[in-house]
């Protein structure tokens, strides 16, 4: 559903404009509310409300008696914030999430199928460069 890479800059109030191509998808699927939280690899994850409910259901069923499950759920859900786009298509990035992702000003917004990721631009460039080298090997392991 969400695809592509879009370079953007935070404004002075820590807002980021969601790219127009992604906002078109919001309109098409009548998505109004999102959840943003700590992602993996030092990025932020943004899920539609529907996808967030699916994530919640999956992780809620992890056994709370397992330390790793408790730790993951605490970090993942405590970092979550409900967001909506304003009339200009912007969302506010909470300060604690900006710090987690190392975001200062320049960001890369990445569509990754069922979610949107927000990366500090320099962290994304480094991640992309390092991951691209093993892209074919990863594909061989994962895709049959």
Image (cartoon, rainbow, N blue to C red):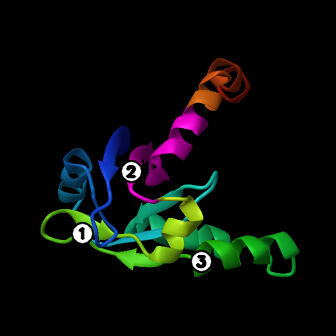
Task: Say if residue 50 shows up in the picture.
Answer: yes
Q: Which residues are magenta?
A: 104-128
Q: Is residue 96 left or right of residue 62?
A: left
Left or right: 79 as drawn, with respect to 103 = right
Mark toward the viewer: 2 or 1? 2
| Residue depicted at x 62% and y 23% | 135
Q: Secondary structure at mark 3?
A: helix
Position of 66 relative to 4 (above/below): below
Q: Earlier in the sequence, mark 3 or mark 1?
A: 3
Q: Position of residue 6 (x, y in %)?
A: 33, 42
Q: Residues within 10 Å of mark 3 (few under 14, many from 20)?
A: some
Q: Is residue 31 magenta?
A: no
Residue that mark 2 sits on: 106
Name the secondary structure under disc 2.
Answer: strand
> In the rendered view, would you say 141 is above or below 121?
above
The image shows residue 17, relative to residue 72, as above or below, that is above
Left or right position of 128 against 19 = right
- Which-is-in-front pick, marks 3 and 2? 2
Q: Residue at x 39, y 56 (%)?
A: 105
Query: Which sits in the foreground, 129 or 76?
Result: 129
Give x and y (percent) for residue 17.
25, 58
Name the residue carrying label 3: 77
Residue 108, image x, y percentages: 41, 46
- Is there CB contact under 8 Å for labels 3 and 1? no
Magenta run includes residue 125: yes
């Amino acid at each position: 559903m969400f695809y592509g890479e879009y370079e953007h800059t935070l404004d002075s109030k820590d807002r980021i404009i969601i790219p127009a191509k992604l906002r078109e998808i919001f309109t098409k699927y009548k998505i109004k509310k999102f959840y943003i939280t700590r992602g993996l690899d030092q990025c932020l994850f943004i899920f539609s409300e529907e996808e967030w409910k699916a994530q919640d259901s999956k992780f809620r069923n992890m056994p709370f008696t397992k330390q790793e499950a408790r730790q993951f759920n605490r970090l993942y859900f405590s970092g979550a914030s409900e967001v909506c786009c304003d009339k200009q298509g912007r969302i506010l990035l909470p300060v604690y999430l900006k710090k987690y992702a190392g975001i200062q000003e320049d960001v890369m917004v990445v569509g990754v199928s069922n979610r949107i990721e927000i990366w500090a631009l320099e962290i994304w460039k480094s991640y992309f460069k390092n991951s691209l080298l093993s892209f074919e090997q990863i594909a061989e392991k994962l895709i049959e």
